[in-house]
Image: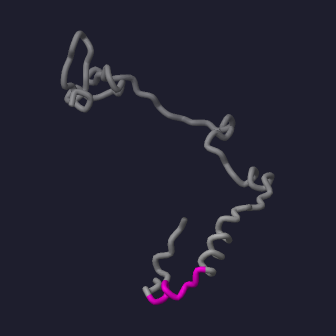
Amino acid sequence: MATDYDSPRKTDDDLNEDSLQELQARRTDKSSGSIDIDETDLAESLELPGADLSNEELSLRVIPRQADEFTCARCFLVHHRSQLAVERNGQQICRECAA
């Protein structure tokens, strides 16, 4: 529920003035909860994250791993040799994974 922090706040006197009947009426109004939405309009206006992107083209240049880089055996990310922490049984592990 959104809160408007710029609206004037009620004082203790204002809170005491609310009658029990008024508070109960507000409660029943909020709990009615039936919302009429035309589902066809809603479906057309939303774009889902798994939308069809078959017509989109992504061009990305992939550079192969360089001689001064290694692939961490735990996180499988390519790091520079300066990030090498441990090499165990031929498996290279980066500093983040070793920590």
Q: Nearer the viewer, residue 16 or 62?
A: 16
Identify the residue at horizontal 21%, vertical 14% (top origin): 88
* Residue 19 point in image, percent of width and height: 58, 84
Up-down relation of residue 94 to residue 3 (above or below): above
In-image side of 19 versus 67 (left or right): right
> Residue 12 appears in which quarter of the rendering?
bottom left
Identify the residue at horizontal 21%, vertical 31% (top origin): 99
User: Does the magenta segment cover residue 22?
Assistant: no
Identify the residue at horizontal 61%, vertical 36% (top origin): 57
Q: Quadrant of the N terminus?
A: bottom right
Q: Please, what is the dominant secondary structure of the magenta stretch? A: helix
Identify the residue at horizontal 67%, vertical 48% (top origin): 47
In-image side of 34 versus 14 (left or right): right
Q: Which residues are magenta?
A: 13-20
User: Does the magenta segment cover residue 14?
Assistant: yes
In-image side of 98 versus 47 (left or right): left
* Residue 72 point in image, percent of width and height: 30, 23
